[in-house]
Amino acid sequence: MTTVASPDVVHRIGQTPLVELTAFSTKKVKLYAKLEWHNPFGSVKDRAAYWMIKDAEKKGILKKDKSIIIEPTSGNTGIALTGIAAALGYKVEIVIPEKVSDETKNILRHLGATLHETSDDLCPRVGSGTDQSIALAKAISKPRPDIYYMPNQYENDANFMAHYESTGPEIWKQTDGKITHFLAGCGTGGTITGTATFLKEKNKNIKVIAIQAQRNHLLQGLRNFEESAMPDLFKRRVGVVDEWMTATNKDSFDAVRLLAEKESLFVGPSSGSAMTCMMKTAEKIDEGIVVAIFPDDARKFKSLYVKEGIFSEQEYDSNLKNAKHMSRLAYSLP
Ligand SMILES: Cc1ncc(COP(=O)(O)O)c(C=O)c1O
């Protein structure tokens, strides 16, 4: 059984809450998290997916009941594209690295996507992880431009615009223009470049901190730029970044636990990465309003957390039950 949301679901994208992490703020250094799992399909990627579909519709590229949207993605973009496309009347095929969590793959199938899985050794000439998926998605779609449309979040400026037009203005407004530091994890670079470009246009002194994952990481959605190529979308505006930080698996998972303990926030691995980097940033400054993007929550990561020994099954279940700021998804979890 697949679930299809009504076309109105797109009006629920954006306007996500910004919450203060009071257990970690001090009088002069305030820490805030932008809870992107409040988007209807559960992550920051709803924004990019919707903007890319809207852009293709405007350009007359998509035809209802004929076009197939194909996209290489490590999960969240696939979920967002599939959910939004189904609601608007398009089919979706997703090319995904096999190491992505089973929960993510099950959600994709449940929302109606056809999956093509890639392994890191599929083609040694291409990089690892999502680079393999990008190569396969291009190979499938290129010969059939009449049917296939590949939004290609790694190159598509609509991904940048999503954050320039929504995430950036929301954070500016939610902090009354007082934000001093902005942190975001990097996959395509759409979130960091779009949001930071808008914020720096408002106040060029805002410090922008980009987070990459360690090599060989378990932090779904993030990249390590020694291991995987920097996407063109990112390269175009990488100058907006003032500082780079690298999040390790261990520090990220420790922060996931800490957030569950101290704030009853039950987050995904990359929100843990954002948190550990936010704490390191806060230690270095005397005052400021520090904002980080929390891309998704823990609901897709039970198998990962239990396998890695981050939580026992019982701990996972009780954290989920007690979690604050959970959201209503536009689909039921399979
Ligand atoms: C789960 C998830 N998706 C996506 C992203 C990154 O988004 P972008 O592709 O805009 O760089 C992140 C970054 O932290 C993430 O954690």
Image (cartoon, helix red, strand yellow):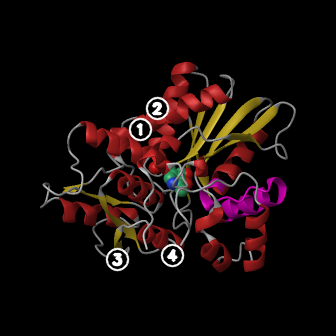
Q: Position of residue 142 (x, y in %)?
A: 16, 58
Image quadrant of residue 34? top right
Left/right of residue 141 with respect to residue 333 in the rendered view: left
Q: Residue at x 48, y 50 (%)?
A: 45
**Residue 116 painted magenta:** no
Image quadrant of residue 124? bottom left
Q: Amino acid at mark 3?
A: Asp
User: Gap between marks 4 and 1, in whole Å?
Assistant: 29 Å
Left/right of residue 258 with respect to residue 87 in the rendered view: right
**Residue 256 painted magenta:** yes
Residue depth check, mark 3 versus mark 4: number of the one nearer the observer: 4
Residue 164 bears which disc, if any? 2
Residue 327 bears which disc, if any? none
Q: Amino acid at mark 2?
A: Tyr
Residue depth check, mark 4 versus mark 1: number of the one nearer the observer: 4
Q: Nearer the viewer, residue 1 or 273?
A: 1
Q: Are marks 3 and 2 in contact (CB under 8 Å)?
A: no
The residue beneath circle 3 is 121
Q: Are marks 2 and 1 in contact (CB under 8 Å)?
A: yes
Q: Is residue 112 above or below residue 90?
A: below
For mark 2, does the 10 Å Cα neighbourhood hold few (<14), some (14 to 19), or many (20 or more) residues? many
- Span shown in magenta: 250-271
Q: Amino acid at mark 1?
A: Phe
